[in-house]
Amino acid sequence: MRILVLHGPNLNLLGTRETETYGTETLEDITHQLDALAVELGVELEHYQSNSEGALVDRVQAAAGLAGALLNPGAYTHTSVALRDAVAGVDLKFVEVHLSNIHGRESFRRTSLLSDLAAGVVVGFGAASYALGLRGLVGYLSDAE
């Protein structure tokens, strides 16, 4: 089972960016944690991060043959109809993840253009949101087989 882990804009700055909100773990730390968990779960991961909306859309479209995806679209969560259309267009099964609790932040962050398409949403647990999301996604995809 191959799964895409997609990170949106500014997530490359994790560990130094607004650490009171996003924590001190880096994207590299999260990648290593997920790779270790993937071995435990018996799945393969493909990691991708971009600050560009178009590049993220292209990567989602290229993921059509994968089992599913773990998506942290970053700020594009709240703004990108294009990313939503790409996920819907390739019928990608995914779990949406966020480090912070988007529902407890600024009002514009409380709306996700992707959540209603997601198998599940994990928010507010820092880097652990990714691990929780991956476990949930693998269980969801296994049940769907």
Image (tube, rainbow, N blue to C red):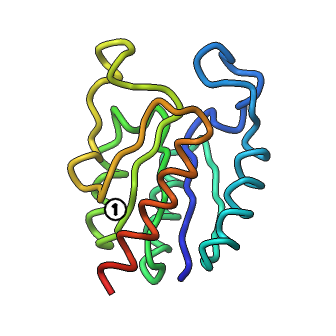
> Residue placed at 62% from the left, 79% from the top?
42
Q: Nearer the viewer, residue 108 or 140?
A: 140
Q: Is residue 15 left or right of residue 135?
A: right
The spot of residue 92 in percent (x, y) is: 35, 69
Label 1 crowd (10 A; few <14 / some 14-19 / many >=20): many
Q: Is residue 43 left or right of residue 139?
A: right
Q: Nearer the viewer, residue 10 or 38?
A: 38
> Residue placed at 47% from the left, 64% from the top?
69
Report the amino acid beneath label 1.
Val
Q: Which residue is mark 1?
A: 87
Q: Is residue 92 left or right of residue 49?
A: left
Q: Is residue 52 above or below residue 43?
A: above
| Count of numbered circles on the image | 1
Quadrant of residue 102 within the rendered picture: top left
> Residue placed at 71% from the left, 31% from the top?
14
Q: Secondary structure at mark 1?
A: helix
Q: Residue furthest left?
A: 116
Q: Is residue 32 above or below residue 20?
A: below
The spot of residue 88 in percent (x, y) is: 26, 64
Q: Residue furthest front?
A: 40
The spot of residue 29 in percent (x, y) is: 78, 45
The spot of residue 129 in percent (x, y) is: 52, 42
